[in-house]
């Protein structure tokens, strides 16, 4: 039931996520506390050094974090996050962000997101979440 619910929640969230879609992200998979998104680095994402602007890498990781921490159908937002950039990416690179839940405690959660280009590590992101009241979708009783 967990992965099925996560898929239904992700579909509802994706339908409203103009930011991720507008950046060309693609939701590859979602599960109970997990998510994987991809993004192809476009020409308009490259900075003056000829590499992807870090804000786009952060946004990809943040989107994967959002789908992972909302996967149980509890409205959840970021309360804080940080990123470590390990290696640069360039135009034409396909970046993959894999989010995994590390721990939940009360209404809080801790998630790690790894951003890769193939086997190359691009960045590590850590997100801290906070559950709000309400759900994303109505669940069948």
Image (tube, rainbow, N blue to C red):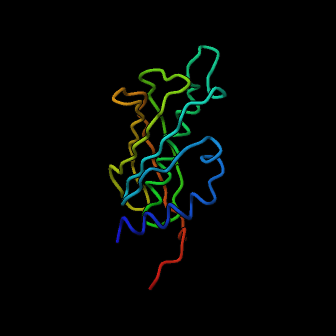
Where residue 25 appears, as percent x and y from the top left, is 55, 44
Which quarter shows the C terminus? bottom left
Up-down relation of residue 139 to residue 80 (above or below):
below
Where residue 123 appears, as percent x and y from the top left, is 43, 30
Where residue 44 appears, as percent x and y from the top left, is 67, 28
Question: Which quarter of the figure has residue 12?
Answer: bottom right
Which quarter shows the N terminus? bottom left
Q: Residue at x 64, y 59 (%)?
A: 16
Up-down relation of residue 5 to residue 33 (above or below):
below
| Drawn side of residue 67 relative to residue 49, left or right | left
Question: Which quarter of the figure has residue 41?
Answer: top right
Q: Residue at x 49, y 28 (%)?
A: 93
Direction front: furthest residue: 92
- The residue closer to the viewer here, 54 or 128, is 54
- The residue closer to the viewer here, 122 or 129, is 122
Where residue 117 appears, as percent x and y from the top left, is 41, 30
């Amino acid at each position: 039931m967990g992965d099925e619910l996560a898929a239904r929640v992700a579909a509802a969230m994706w339908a409203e996520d103009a930011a991720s879609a507008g950046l060309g992200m693609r939701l590859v998979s979602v599960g109970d506390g997990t998510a994987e998104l991809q993004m192809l680095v476009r020409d308009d994402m490259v900075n003056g050094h000829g590499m992807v602007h870090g804000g786009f890498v952060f946004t990809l990781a943040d989107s994967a974090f959002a789908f992972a921490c909302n996967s149980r159908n509890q409205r959840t937002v970021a309360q804080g996050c940080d990123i470590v950039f390990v290696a640069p990416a360039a135009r034409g690179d396909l970046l993959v962000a894999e989010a995994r839940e590390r721990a939940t405690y009360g209404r809080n959660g801790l998630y790690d997101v790894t951003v890769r280009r193939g086997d190359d590590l691009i960045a590590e992101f850590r997100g801290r979440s906070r559950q709000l009241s309400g759900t994303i979708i109505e669940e069948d009783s």
